[in-house]
């Protein structure tokens, strides 16, 4: 695989269709399932982690980062499943996405703390995963008994800082930038930034890009359809999912557009969504073209 420049800001002439670009991405080598090796840096580092994340790309992304450090990871796709898995297992750390359907991460954390109080045992460290402003999340995390939070997309270095804080029994851990600086031009596709977050794991980047290409078209269409029919809550949910997926692959501008749509639904006059639909479609096609240019298929 040949990498392009660190930050891709512009695409080519736009000649290939979306379908052609998506197929070029699918031709990337997809690695075999990762098998964790090695041991944690310290016996105090969590050995078994419960990860609750409803976005499958974000779940795979974080799971692989944890497995790279020799940790066993048990995944849950929603809040109810997370509570069930917590009841049926022993964990050294729980990581909860704060925005999950039916039961969010805050509700799950509250239930975990109540179960621990009833059982008379100690408290398991619970960390929130969020793409929202960290300042807005901080007090809520404390109120439900969480130990801290990580901003998404999570990086390999974020996890190391988190574990260092847990080893020192530090509370209120919140590494991560918490979002791009609005004064800095957002990149169409920041491949190197994503690789840095992944600790340089190129195979993992390929894997999450493949998942993005398979899943994102349906989500984008879901946003458009929901906006056009006035289903604003559904549009916001789809936009939230797209925001996280785009951030994980380094598609900063697409993530920003999705964030604006998510935060604006229900707050703008009727008919004002059309410019955002056009921007969303155009940016998504540009991202797919850029992804296709990042890596080429090996010769047969």
Image (cartoon, rainbow, N blue to C red):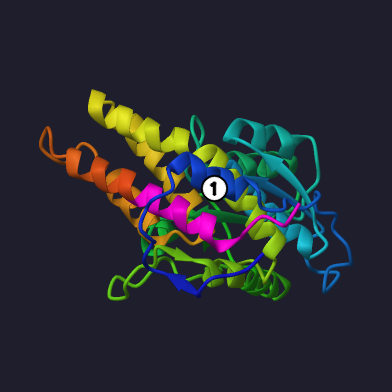
Q: Main secondary structure of the magenta part?
A: helix
Q: Which residue is drawn at the image coordinates 74% and 53% (left, top)?
A: 122
Left of 189 or right of it: where is 194? right
Do we see residue 58 in this rendering? no
Left of 132 or right of it: where is 103? right
- Residue 51 spot, x, y in % from top left: 67, 47
Q: Which residue is drawn at the image coordinates 74% and 41% (left, top)?
A: 119
- Of all residues shown, which one is farthest toward the front? 300
- Of all residues shown, which one is farthest toward the top? 229
In magenta, the rendered stretch is 283-300
Residue denoted by label 1: 97
Q: Is residue 259 magenta?
A: no
Left of 23 or right of it: where is 72? right
Q: Is residue 291 magenta?
A: yes
Q: Secondary structure at mark 1?
A: strand
* Figure quadrant of residue 131: bottom left
Q: Which residue is drawn at the image coordinates 39% and 61% (left, top)?
A: 12
- Residue 42 spot, x, y in % from top left: 83, 73
Do we see residue 229 in this rendering? yes
For the N terminus, the image quarter is bottom right
Which of the pair 279/1 is nearer the observer? 1
* Figure quadrant of residue 68: bottom right
Crowding near the residue tagged with mark 1, few <14, some 14–19, many ≥20 C-alpha atoms within 10 Å: many
Q: How many marks?
A: 1
Which of the pair 113/223 is nearer the observer? 223
- Of all residues shown, which one is farthest toward the left? 269
- Of all residues shown, which one is farthest toward the right? 38
Q: Vertical placement of 191 versus 291: above or below?
A: below
- Residue 89 spot, x, y in % from top left: 80, 40
Q: Vertical placement of 236 versus 297: above or below?
A: above
- Residue 19 spot, x, y in % from top left: 48, 39
Which of the pair 261/83 is nearer the observer? 261
């Amino acid at each position: 695989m040949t990498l392009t420049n660190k930050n891709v800001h512009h695409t080519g002439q736009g000649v290939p269709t979306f379908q052609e670009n998506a197929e070029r991405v699918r031709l990337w080598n997809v690695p075999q399932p990762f098998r964790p090796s090695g041991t944690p840096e310290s016996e105090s580092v969590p050995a078994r982690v419960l990860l609750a994340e409803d976005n499958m790309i974000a779940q795979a992304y974080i799971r692989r980062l944890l497995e790279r450090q020799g940790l066993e990871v048990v995944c849950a796709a929603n809040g109810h499943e997370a509570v069930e898995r917590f009841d049926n297992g022993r964990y050294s750390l729980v990581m909860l996405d704060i925005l999950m359907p039916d039961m969010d991460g805050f509700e799950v954390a509250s239930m975990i703390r109540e179960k621990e109080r009833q059982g008379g045992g100690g408290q398991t460290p619970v960390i929130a995963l969020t793409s929202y402003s960290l300042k807005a999340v901080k007090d809520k995390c404390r109120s439900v008994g969480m130990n801290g939070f990580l901003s998404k997309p999570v990086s390999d270095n974020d996890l190391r800082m988190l574990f260092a804080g847990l080893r020192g029994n530090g509370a209120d851990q919140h590494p991560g930038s918490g979002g791009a600086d609005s004064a800095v031009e957002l990149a169409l596709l920041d491949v190197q930034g994503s690789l840095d977050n992944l600790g340089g794991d190129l195979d993992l980047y390929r894997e999450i890009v493949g998942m993005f290409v398979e899943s994102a078209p349906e989500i984008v269409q879901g946003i458009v359809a929901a906006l056009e029919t006035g289903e604003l809550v559904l549009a916001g949910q789809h936009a939230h999912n797209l925001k996280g997926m785009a951030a994980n692959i380094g598609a900063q501008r697409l993530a920003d557009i999705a964030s604006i749509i998510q935060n604006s639904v229900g707050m703008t006059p009727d008919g004002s969504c059309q410019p955002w639909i056009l921007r969303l479609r155009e940016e998504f096609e540009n991202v797919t073209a850029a992804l296709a240019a990042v890596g080429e298929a090996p010769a047969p």
